[in-house]
Amino acid sequence: MTVPLLSVPLLSVSGLQVRYGDLVGVGDVSLAVPAGAVVALLGSNGAGKTTTLNAIAGLVPPAGGSVTWQGRAITGAPAFAIVASGLALAPEGWRLFVQQTVEQNLRLGATVLADKRRVPALLDRVFTLFPRLAERRRQRAGTLSGGERQMLATGRALMSDPKLLMLDEPSLGLAPAVIESMYQTLARLRQEGLTLLLAEQAVELALEVADYAYVLQTGRTVLDGPAAALADDKDVQRIYLGLETERRS
């Protein structure tokens, strides 16, 4: 099901800029994410995808532009306030508290909840989505495989019970079977009504599940459109995403 991008978006970013001293991390990124949609943020390594998500999540300060969440400006707001408002980021799976157990990492994701009585139900939800985490709930995060770490990073973000979940490279470095399982879980979350903003280098995979996509190149939004249209455009893949045609006539 394609979600039309005509209604007021749940999240909107306009002219976002991020600088690290004299280095431009993001120069001009704009995007919109409507409720119930899966939106992909595409681009090669270094295109600015991670920086964009971190700026939206309040982890790095924007140098310019605006971020609006549920109709309210959150540009430059602290990360804990953004998470508490229902906007969560699942980073790459290596950003965990490696000396803590799986369950301890998950419970840390729920610290923003005002009603701590909800934590057991949220834990059950995560363990249902990721049975492997339930099996390893007493195991230290630092001993997990790459796929298990990605599951844990996603599960920790879900513990805040977000309205919109941002995922940074959920397929990076994972085996094909693990990637398939992860994307099946994302499809299930979408069916449950969760809105997703997905940053990926795995272009074909992301476009297969997304309704709409934005392409970044050197920190700028250079193209956007329905995911199906971008998936069929070979010139878009070659020019903007750095993919080469394997077979040439």
Image (cartoon, grey):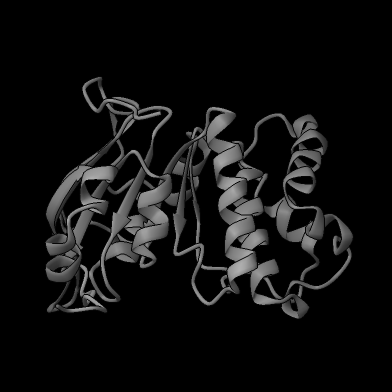
Is residue 58 visible to us here?
Answer: no
Residue 120, x across and y down, in percent:
83, 37
Residue 107 versus residue 249: which sits nearer the camera? 249
Residue lying furthest front in this view?
A: 249
Q: Nearer the viewer, residue 44 or 125?
A: 44
Q: Residue 88 appears at what percent x and percent y?
A: 49, 46
Q: Vertically, is 10 above or below 154?
A: above
Q: Is residue 202 found left or right of 183 in the rendered image?
A: left
Q: Quadrant of residue 161?
A: top right
In the rendering, at what x and y percent does residue 226 appear? 24, 40
Residue ID at (23%, 70%): 47
Quadrant where the image shows the C terminus? bottom left
Residue at 56% x, 46% y is 186
Quick check: can you spot residue 3?
yes
Report whether 184 appears left or right of 85. right
Placement of 191 over or under 182, stated as above or below? above
Residue 210 shown left or right of residue 121 in the figure: left
